[in-house]
Amino acid sequence: MDKNSLRTIRERAMESRKQHEMVNALRQYGPAPSLRADFARCAIDLACEHHSAIIRLVCAGEYGSAAALLRPLLEASGSASWLLYIASCDRVRELATDVEMAEGRRRDLPLLDELARELQPKFPLIKALVNGLKDRGPATWLHKYTHGGAAQLVRRTTGWNEAEVMLILLRADLFAILAAAHETVVVTNAKLAVYAFGRRDDLGTEGLDRFGFGPVPEQPHSLPPPLIDGCGVPFSSAIGAALHER
């Protein structure tokens, strides 16, 4: 890419960085109110970390690695939704709270395809993702870049152009802001709600203007209430200042 394209990408990456910093400033870092909320808050935090990493990778020109993190970012966001809205308490309590056990062969969170299917009744707009992921549909590129498929290998020769990298950043911002919005139903957070849902709408407009995506249906500036049963006491201490300062 030429210098103008690289400058344009860096300027757009700085917009993504501002989003990350704003979300970090507005999130609350006290103890989670329940076991369910604790796991969900950790999923939100993981999504925020993936988002930050994608921005760093784009700024370093490592676009294939940035694309590889889009699926884990979306998966972390979907996990937060699943934990807050779908998972039974039996499933929540099955999740290991010890690192050694969690890294073993214990039952874990659903993967992206299953997450999307289970969330569709609660969030019907996910239907497009569900359809895109099945039967080698158009969204399977998420898997290909994460798992080092042929798409990643071919990129070693063709490279990336400005528009493609801008799309990585747009998608990363959208996946991350949707993850952050879940914090507003863990603990009431009016300032984060105003920012997150406004930012979501702005990203939808950017997708329409820059890439010609179809108009995004008007959506409420709030999430529905999560499941009432918190499934027990939280397992972790508050997410610390070191994470807040990433």
Image (cartoon, rainbow, N blue to C red):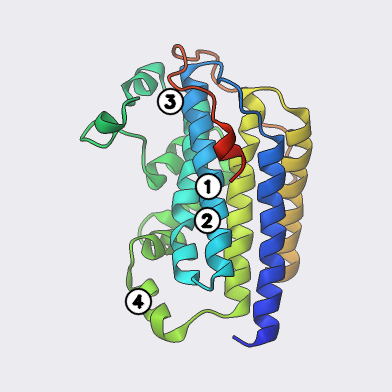
Q: Are marks 2 and 1 in contact (CB under 8 Å)?
A: yes
Pick the residue in front: 218 or 35.
35
Residue at (46, 57) in percent of width and height? 69
Foreground tag (2 vs 3): 2
For mark 1, does the 10 Å Cα neighbourhood hold few (<14), some (14 to 19), or many (20 or more) residues? Answer: some
Which residue lies under the disc numbered 3? Answer: 87
Q: Are marks 2 and 3 in contact (CB under 8 Å)?
A: no
181 to the left or right of 44: right
User: Residue 90 in the image: x percent, y percent?
Assistant: 35, 17
Which residue lies under the disc numbered 4? Answer: 153
**N-terminal-most mark, 1 or 4:** 1
**N-terminal-most mark, 2 or 3:** 2
Residue type at the position of mark 4: Leu
208 to the left or right of 227: right
Which residue lies under the disc numbered 2? Answer: 53
* SS state under label 1: helix
**N-terminal-most mark, 1 or 3:** 1
Residue type at the position of mark 3: Ala
For mark 2, does the 10 Å Cα neighbourhood hold few (<14), some (14 to 19), or many (20 or more) residues? Answer: some
